Image: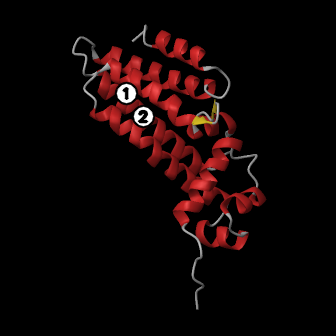
Amino acid sequence: MARTKKYNEQEVIEKAMNLFWRNGYETTSMQMLEKEMGINKFSIYSSFGSKNGVFLESIKCYKEKLNELINKLKTSNKGTNGLKEYFYDFIAFSKENECGKGCLITNTANEIGQDADEQIKTSLFSFTEHVRTVFAEVLKQDKTKDNNTIEQQADYLLISMFGLSSATRVFNELQLKNYIENIFKNV
């Protein structure tokens, strides 16, 4: 007879997501996951299969949370100003105490190497492509931009977002504001 789970998978995944977000994939051990999630290794392996399984579920959880900001951007009719709002909203989203945690996707992309798990790499790539597509759709609101300009600026904004994600971990609010304002002088 199967044992009944005494934990909520969504709750333990949120705890794991925050642990990965703070410490990174490589640094996070199974012992750390056990302690943070409040469940034993057997339960982790039973529910998620492996550390990779926990991480992939953590990425899904992160995407769901960030999609609230992305959906706000998608439904905005503010064009470039909506994009700028998204950048500012992201800073608030990434805050933990006085410093930011960056972006789980960006942090992971900066950490993993070529030999990383293919599912993890695919998940990261598909999400960044989704964000880039949303950026391009919002840029199309400006009817003076041609397709080539839109594609170039969507790439520029995506790469700038990666920079902002890393910067939230180190720089103060004024420096981040200056960074964002300068990004949008070029869009």
Name which residue type carries label 2: Val
Give the x, y percent position of residue 28.
73, 50
**Exactly how many numbered labels are in the figure?**
2
Q: Is residue 94 above or below residue 59?
A: above
Instruction: Determine which residue is flagged by label 1.
Output: 135
In the image: residue 158, left or right of residue 35: left
- Tell me the colour scheme of the image: secondary structure
Q: Circle 1 sits in a helix, a strand or a loop, which is it?
A: helix
Give the x, y percent position of residue 78.
28, 22
Residue occupying image coordinates x 62% and y 48%:
18
Residue occupying image coordinates x 64% and y 31%:
98
In this view, the residue in front, 28 or 133, is 28
Give the x, y percent position of residue 35.
74, 61
In this view, the residue in front, 19 or 27, is 19
Quadrant occupied by the C terminus: top left
Give the x, y percent position of residue 129.
44, 35
Residue occupying image coordinates x 42% and y 34%:
131
Instruction: Determine which residue is flagged by label 2.
Output: 131
Q: Circle 2 sits in a helix, a strand or a loop, which is it?
A: helix
Q: Is residue 164 above or below residue 122?
A: above
Name which residue type carries label 1: Phe
In this view, the residue in front, 130 or 182, is 182
